[in-house]
Image (spheres, helix red, strand yellow):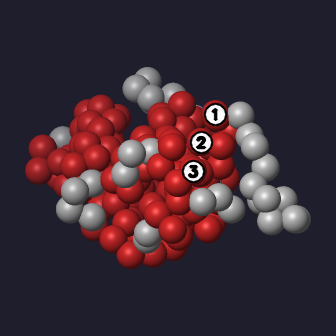
Amino acid sequence: MSTDGVTRRLPRAQRREQILDAATEAFARTGFAATSLDDVAAQAGVTRMIVYTHFESKTALYQAVLARMRDRLAASTGAPDFDHFSIAGLLRVAAAEPAGFRLLFHHAAREPEFRAEVDRMRAAGFAVAHQYLAPTIPDPDWANWACHLVPIVVQEAV
């Protein structure tokens, strides 16, 4: 919003990114249920109608925020070909976008309609850990335990 109270016209792609940035902050602050589209619009400095021109619903907006963060993490960590640089990539994204990271791994995990997204990511984390750890841990029960624990520890440590 400009200093005279008039919303500045931005190209559609830029406005969409502005709304996604604002939605990430707003949803990370209070979660999906407690955040309204008016909250997102105020955070973005636009009207609710402008939000609706880019996203058909609050659910669609939330899904877009989660997908954007998931895609940024995938690009930064080298998914699906993880290597010894993947943790550094995860840390870079989490440091650059703490609200998005918190939203994806904490808020979305507690929202029933978005839980499946987080579960898929956790399953992928288990698969990566299993790929690298299982061959080094002789007992299959201990290997499975470690492979479930490592992604959780990494997320919580971040």
As helix, strand or loop, the secondary structure at mark 2 comes to helix
The quarter in which the N terminus is drawn is: bottom right
**Crowdedness of circle 2 by 10 Å Cα count: few (<14), some, many (20+)?**
some
Q: Position of residue 30 (x, y in %)?
A: 45, 75
Residue at the limit of the structure toward the right, as seen here:
3
First reached walking from the N terminus: tag 3 or tag 1:
1
Q: Going by the image, does 115 lie left or right of 57?
A: left
Q: Residue at left 68%, top 38%? A: 14
Q: Report the amino acid beneath label 2.
A: Arg
Which of the two residues, 69 or 8, is positioned nearer the viewer here? 8
Decide if residue 22 is in sight here.
yes
Q: Is disc 3 in contact with disc 1, using a CB cutoff of under 8 Å?
A: no
As helix, strand or loop, the secondary structure at mark 3 comes to helix
Which of the two residues, 50 or 108, is positioned nearer the viewer here? 50
Question: Mark 3 and mark 1: span between their CA atoms?
Answer: 13 Å
From the image, tell me which residue sits under label 1. 13
Q: What number is the disc on residue 50?
A: 3
Q: Is disc 2 in contact with disc 1, using a CB cutoff of under 8 Å?
A: yes
Q: Position of residue 92 (x, y in %)?
A: 64, 47
From the image, tell me which residue sits under label 2. 16
